[in-house]
Image: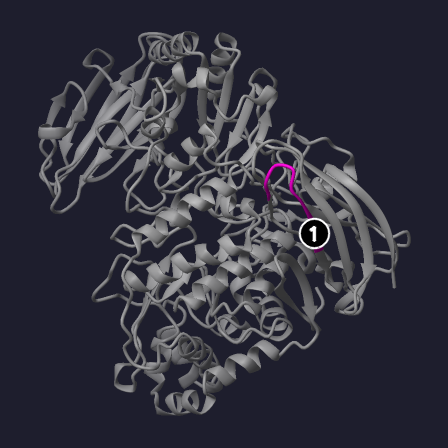
Amino acid sequence: MARRVRGRWAVMAAGSAVVMGVSWVGPAQAEAASAAAKPDKIDRLIAAMTLDEKIALLHGGTDPASVGQAGYVPGVPRLGIPELRLTDGPAGVRVTKPSTALPAPVSLGSTFSTELATQYGGILGRETRAQGADVLLGPMTNIIRVPQAGRNFETLSEDPFVTATIGAAEVRGVQRAGAIATVKHYAENNQEEQRGTIDVRVDEQTMQEIELPGFGAAVEAGAGAVMCAYNKVNGDYAGENSTLLTDILKEQFGFAGWVMSDWGATHSTEKAITAGLDMQMPNGSYFGAPLKTAVESGRLDVAVVDRSVRRILVSMDRAGLLDGATPRPEIDERAGARVSRDVAEQGAVLLRNQRGALPLGRDDLRSLGLIGPTAKTTLVGGGGSARVTPLHTTSTLDELRRHANVRYAAGVDLDGAAIPASALSLTRTNTSTGETRPDPQVDYTGPDALPAGSAWRWTGTFTAPRTGDYELKLQTAGGSGTLSVDGTQVLTTGGFFSDASLIPTADDLTNASYPVHLTAGEAHEITLTGTAEAETPLQIRFGWLTPTARESAISTAVATAKKARAAVVFGYDEGTESRDRTSLGLPGYQNELIDRVAAANPDTVVVLNTGSSVLMPWKDKVRAILETWYPGEEGGTATARLLLGHANPSGKLTQTFPADPDQTPTSTPERYPGVDGLEQYSEGIYVGYRWYDAEGVEPLYAFGHGLSYTTFGYSGLRVRPAADGGLNVAFTVRNTGSRTGTEVPQVYIGRPDRVPAGVQIADRSLAGFERVTLKPGQARSVRIHVAKRQLSYWSAADDAWTVATGRRPVDVGSSSRDLRLHGETAVR
């Protein structure tokens, strides 16, 4: 990777069209930030600080008045430098108190709306301040590279242009609300598998063109902080990688704020801070006493410490945090709910709609079958650090019952039942006292909960009465639990990265499931533990879902569908931090459920609550498919409005949905999950739709795809050179249907007729888009500016953006595979 870098990203709006360009003056953002931060003031503060006070700003500590946030920095009270509280928040502020639970960022990306992204960021920024925090740990702008990646729901797109455009707008919203935005995870953190150790090997052109645009755009938009990733990049951990942190981020992008580690992602003292890491989180194991020793021993110049302190103070001052205490706002629950609902509605993607199955008609509403757990209990968001306790939730089932005669069946039995004494042989031990006793079963719930502060262990065996596929259930509340089978721990509950579902049991217990095939009469050893919280009794249940219970749940759903005029089945997965999906299919037996419901009722619609792409073996058997992602606290209302036609879907896919798990850009082990600790980004710039185009592979659903309850026509393409070296693209979009609707026309720039040797250029790349709302019969002239940057490639030889000259195709359409208008222009 070359170390001489220059140039930076800029994202701007031209009218209502979205454009992206490049500014060629690297230090401009740093100069503007320094000017805004009053350098004399910062200089005086640094000069007045002791070494201990400086070092205390460079690592996390223990908060004496925690609000339940992720991190804390004590500040320097005697100099008027306030403490900092850092909170998780890519989809809502994650503290002890409830916050607005916004739809997952993948839903925001699917809106293709910079206006909504700014509003989304505004809610996050306001509530960060309202909840007693100052720094928001978001947005995430890593590229969706691996379909199985567990955090795909938490980022925006497989396309760098969409990621940069929407991410920058969100950052502006956060910063304008008075909070400090932290763009993460810098860089190439594109999977959870082995994320703490994997070494990503990526060439310079690929990194500059695919992963880095989102970060550069966030910097240009004013992000005050950057969080480094866990993984290595080309041999060095991201948190001690001088090429990433100094050469690119601080010199090429002109970043003037500070770089913090991800939690536990610091691996050294002098190497890390010299490379450009400014703050260790969440403690000072490297940037506390070891950093002080390095300075006092003379191994590290105190000027390096001062540099990091300055960056933190600059961002704090830009946010007004050095101007004395300022009043914190209140949470505006109505505003949060409105933005949550708008994003959920406008980010929903109508994938399929045969013979106008949606919106539901009058006859459908007279007899509607609703099936699936998330129809009743909204899957508000994903897991891990993005999980938010919502201010309220809405239910699609409840909303539809106001408009329709609805029969409901779960179809998927999430709770199971306590394993009966006849299948168990257990001994219970009080691990505090050592007392033991036989226990017929483990079902200590409600009034039978175990005492607060107690800890327990059960050992013994369980035996299945019938051969088949089971799900073992560990269900807890008021504490934590673990389950081991035949010596291997298979389930945990209660921890930050537990195995629990985001959907609780009917009696509100945390619910973790482990699928296992059991043979009748064969005993298995188990160890079960339960630990109560200090002041809360422990509820704990060891249960299972038997083959008989599973069949009963499906049969009930099928019977419900048969009795209904139309059936709507909800399918879901649960994306989360810390682990990738093991399959692109819907979890459990949901595919079987959808198959059998569709066989029972030809008017079946599927609503998906997934965080990323899924396979759909039943696609051609159902009439409509609506992807609503993880739709936030207003998801129930939004989904009902979409099904009823009170809202018209306008979302577009920001990631390709593959048809075959063995035909994706990362289907080889070398590309994912990596071999011997190395992961090769050998696909180069051909990520997502670029790979499908280059390889001639037909996806299940293409990037940019999304239908509407109306139709649109395109005409009159005109392409002209622009004064800035880019292109001005104009065309007309007409609503040719009978409903008001919103289309997102997309402009793609093709490969030139002459490609320099050794340079990668995709068959086509997204270069512009715009949301256009039209009444029936209405037409509008759309003008989209394609900036010079979108006509350029990164030259590793020159360490600069270079225009790809020659004859270049210009295509306009409704998706990357639905191109309606075709032109060509000479780029010089």
- x, y percentage for residue 722? 79, 65
At 64% from the left and 33% from the top, the residue drawn is 711
Residue positioned 45% across, 34% down in the render: 646
Q: Would you identify the image quadrant in which residue 744 lies?
A: top right
- Dot 1, how many residues are within 10 Å of its Cα: few (below 14), some (14-19), or many (20+)? some
Relative height, residue 621 to residue 822 (above, below): above
Give the residue pinned by disc 1. Answer: 782
Name, please, the residue furthest toward the front. 777
Q: Which residues are magenta?
A: 774-783
Instruction: Provide the major secondary structure of the magenta segment.
Output: strand
Label 1 sits on a secondary structure element that is: strand
Please indicate whether residue 459 sits to the left or right of residue 367 in the image: left
Q: Quadrant of the N terminus?
A: bottom right
Residue 597 left/right relative to 740? left
**Compared to 545, does 699 lie above or below?**
below
378 or 267: nearer the eye?
378
Q: On the picture, is 337 further left or further right than 592?
A: left
Q: Nearer the viewer, residue 455 or 770?
A: 770
Residue drawn at 35 percent across, 81 percent down? 322
Compare residues 651 and 678 and report the one nearer the observer: 651
Within the magenta stretch, is there residue 778?
yes
> Which residue is nearer to you in this view: 614 or 556?
556
Residue 126: give x, y in percent of width and height.
Answer: 36, 62
Q: Which quarter of the figure is the C terminus placed in?
A: bottom right
Q: Which percent across, then down, holds residue 500? A: 34, 35
Q: Is residue 541 magenta?
A: no
| 324 relative to 48, above or below | above
Name the image quarter holding residue 532: top left
- Residue 268 shows in this picture: yes
